[in-house]
Image (cartoon, rainbow, N blue to C red):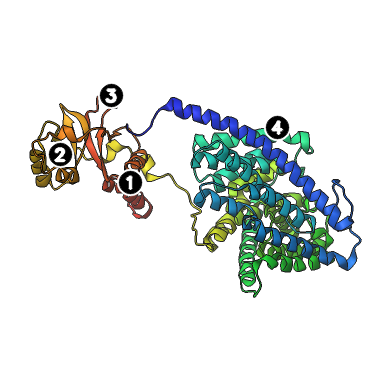
């Protein structure tokens, strides 16, 4: 056994293989996105128009009258049965479930999820559920990536990379926003920023982006022309950001109050989606355009085609339907509803916001509500540009989204994504920083005053040295070259062979780290060896002993990082 594996050629080979597999996952996830969209269209036609067709149709044009209230209830019953007797992993809006599997489930997803998640979402959205297709495709694409990784016998870290590759490629295929999908991976799914994970995900998103025009309409999903803004947009952007942040807080709190209310019902959770379906059906009866995904409504909001009074009514109903349905634990996504709610806020505010057009404020509020609810501001900014290609809106987007995100950060402890996981007893911080152990090397932390044992010593002499120094483990050297580590327990096991040399006890022992390695790599090595200290050598060939690294030494970078965060210093 040697030191920490640092063979760059081997790592490069694995990375290239992972990139190749991720590109395949990107193509498969794109196909899965097409199948999901077709399934939603089929279910919409079956529920609202009672005919078998994959043509795109709007639930708002149905002629069912009051019978339309029953459709979401039927969809809720079907999904409840699928969740109880198929897999309860299909409940929810997809992203928190993916985060939980990545962080706490070693990125293992089942084939059931890959099949049942899109099927359940197609039924829910097709029966009028106020959701988007992005959450289901994130779970479905992620499941496909995870399954392929399991089939190829990859590591947990590589499974995570392929899971996220599939999830983000699916999002790219739905919205045509590969850069935003990559940022979503960085802000919410990968929990690291390393080439080994970011490069495969980027390639998967690129593949999905190139394939998308062959299966969906090319160009931005919501094309929008925005004129350059004036200086007064600075104040308007701050106001819009504050309003968006407040709305995000209200939506988040309302959702989890609704979940709490459902949890108190004296019925099995299998029936909750049907109960939520009643609210959806009633809301859709009064506001038919609140049914379904609502991309057409989002386009109308961005292009200012709706009167303010109609927008207020539509968005109030949509918000209630969405909160009730999602709080019931049914299957569906959150991005499209949040886009609609945010865009509606912008339309309502636009008459009082100078410095830009109504379309501009609909766009920036749409992104601000999305970014602050998800806790992913960078994703929201780039997502809005990718959806509309309105590059003139970049500066107001940055301002408004940042302000809204600041509001929710100050008011809420967690985002809508991490709160859902926290309620299951699993906690995720929304702040990520460089691991303190990554910033320091073994050479910075090791003890250079090394007490060692000569390999030629007898066991009796070695025991005297160990007892005098009161150490449980001491390095063994021969002519300055490391031979291994001597455990006090080994000496006790050979107390009757005191004339043996220490070298006779070290067969096969090679435990060391390099002085040039990161503290994090050394810590991983010590965990792998199950030891509390390890000798440090200058190079792998000469094995010249230069120090000893203990677990207590690895706490020093953490302490230094804590001081940087908390210690107030004067100007010198």
Q: Nearer the viewer, residue 320 or 345?
A: 320
Q: Tell me the element at label 4.
A: helix
Which of the two discs, 4 and 2, sits closer to the camera?
2
Earlier along the polypeptide chain: callout 3 or callout 4?
4
Q: Nearer the viewer, residue 402 or 494?
A: 494
Q: Tell me the element at label 1.
A: helix
Residue labelled with disc 1: 557
* Circle 3/circle 4 CB separation < 8 Å: no
Earlier along the polypeptide chain: callout 4 or callout 2?
4
Q: Residues within 10 Å of mark 3 (few under 14, many from 20)?
A: few
Q: Residues within 10 Å of mark 4 (few under 14, many from 20)?
A: some
Q: How many marks?
A: 4
Q: Tell me the element at label 3.
A: loop
Q: Nearer the viewer, residue 357 or 16?
A: 16
Q: Is residue 164 visible?
A: no
Q: Is residue 565 visible?
A: yes
Q: Which disc number belongs to residue 451?
A: 2
Query: Residue 294 at what x, y percent from top left?
Result: 78, 53
Q: Residue furthest bottom?
A: 266
Query: Residue 309 at what x, y percent from top left?
Result: 81, 64
Q: How far is mark 4 from mark 1, CA to CA?
A: 44 Å
Residue labelled with disc 4: 210
Which of the two discs, 1 and 2, sits closer to the camera?
2
Q: How far is mark 3 from mark 1, CA to CA?
A: 29 Å
Residue labelled with disc 3: 541
Q: Is residue 278 above or below residue 398?
A: below
């Amino acid at each position: 056994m040697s030191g920490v594996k640092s063979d760059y050629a081997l790592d490069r080979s694995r990375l290239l293989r992972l990139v190749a597999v991720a590109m395949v996952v990107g193509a498969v996830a794109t196909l899965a996105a097409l199948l999901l969209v077709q399934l939603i269209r089929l279910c919409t036609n079956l529920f609202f128009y009672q005919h078998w067709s994959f043509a795109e149709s709007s639930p708002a044009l149905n002629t069912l009258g009051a019978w339309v209230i029953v459709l979401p209830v039927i969809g809720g019953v079907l999904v409840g049965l699928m969740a109880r007797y198929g897999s309860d992993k299909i409940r929810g809006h997809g992203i928190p479930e993916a985060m939980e599997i990545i962080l706490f489930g070693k990125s293992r997803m089942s084939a059931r999820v890959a099949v049942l998640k899109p099927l359940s979402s197609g039924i829910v959205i097709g029966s009028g559920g106020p959701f988007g297709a992005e959450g289901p495709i994130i779970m479905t694409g992620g499941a496909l990536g995870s399954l392929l990784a399991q089939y190829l016998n990859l590591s947990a870290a590589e499974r995570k990379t392929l899971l996220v590759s599939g999830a983000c490629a699916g999002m790219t295929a739905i919205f045509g926003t590969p850069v935003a999908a990559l940022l979503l991976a960085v802000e919410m799914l990968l929990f690291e920023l390393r080439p080994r994970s970011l490069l495969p995900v980027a390639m998967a998103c690129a593949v999905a982006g190139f394939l998308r025009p062959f299966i969906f309409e090319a160009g931005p999903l919501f094309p929008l022309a925005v004129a350059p803004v004036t200086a007064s947009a600075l104040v308007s952007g701050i106001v819009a950001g504050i309003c968006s942040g407040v709305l995000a807080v209200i939506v988040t709190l309302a959702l989890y109050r609704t979940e709490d209310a459902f949890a108190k019902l004296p019925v099995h959770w299998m029936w909750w989606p049907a109960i939520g379906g009643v609210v959806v059906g009633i809301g859709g009866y009064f506001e038919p355009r609140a049914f379904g995904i609502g991309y057409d409504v989002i386009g109308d909001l961005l292009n200012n085609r709706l009167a303010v009074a109609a927008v207020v009514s539509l968005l109030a109903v949509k918000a209630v339907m969405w909160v009730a349905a999602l709080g019931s634990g049914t299957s569906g996504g959150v991005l499209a509803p949040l886009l609609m709610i945010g865009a509606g806020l912008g339309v309502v505010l636009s008459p009082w916001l100078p410095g830009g057009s109504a379309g501009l404020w609909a766009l920036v509020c749409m992104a601000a509500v999305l970014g602050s609810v998800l806790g992913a501001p960078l994703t929201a900014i780039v997502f809005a540009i990718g959806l509309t290609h309105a590059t003139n809106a970049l500066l107001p987007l940055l301002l408004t989204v940042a302000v809204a995100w600041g509001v929710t950060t100050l008011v809420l402890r967690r985002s809508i994504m991490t709160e859902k996981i926290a309620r299951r007893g699993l906690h995720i911080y929304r702040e990520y920083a460089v691991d303190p152990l990554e910033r320091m090397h073994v050479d910075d932390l090791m003890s250079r005053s090394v007490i060692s044992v000569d390999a030629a010593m007898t066991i009796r002499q070695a025991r005297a040295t160990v007892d005098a120094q009161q150490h449980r483990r001491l390095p063994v050297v021969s002519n300055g070259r490391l031979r291994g580590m001597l455990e006090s327990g080994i000496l006790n096991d050979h107390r009757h062979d005191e004339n043996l040399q220490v070298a006779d006890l070290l067969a096969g022992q090679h435990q060391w780290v390099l002085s040039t390695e990161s503290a994090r790599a050394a810590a991983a090595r010590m965990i792998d060896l199950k030891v509390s200290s390890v000798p440090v050598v200058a190079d792998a060939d000469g094995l010249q002993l230069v120090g000893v690294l203990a677990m207590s030494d690895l706490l020093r970078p953490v302490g230094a990082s804590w001081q940087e965060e908390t210690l107030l210093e004067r100007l010198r």
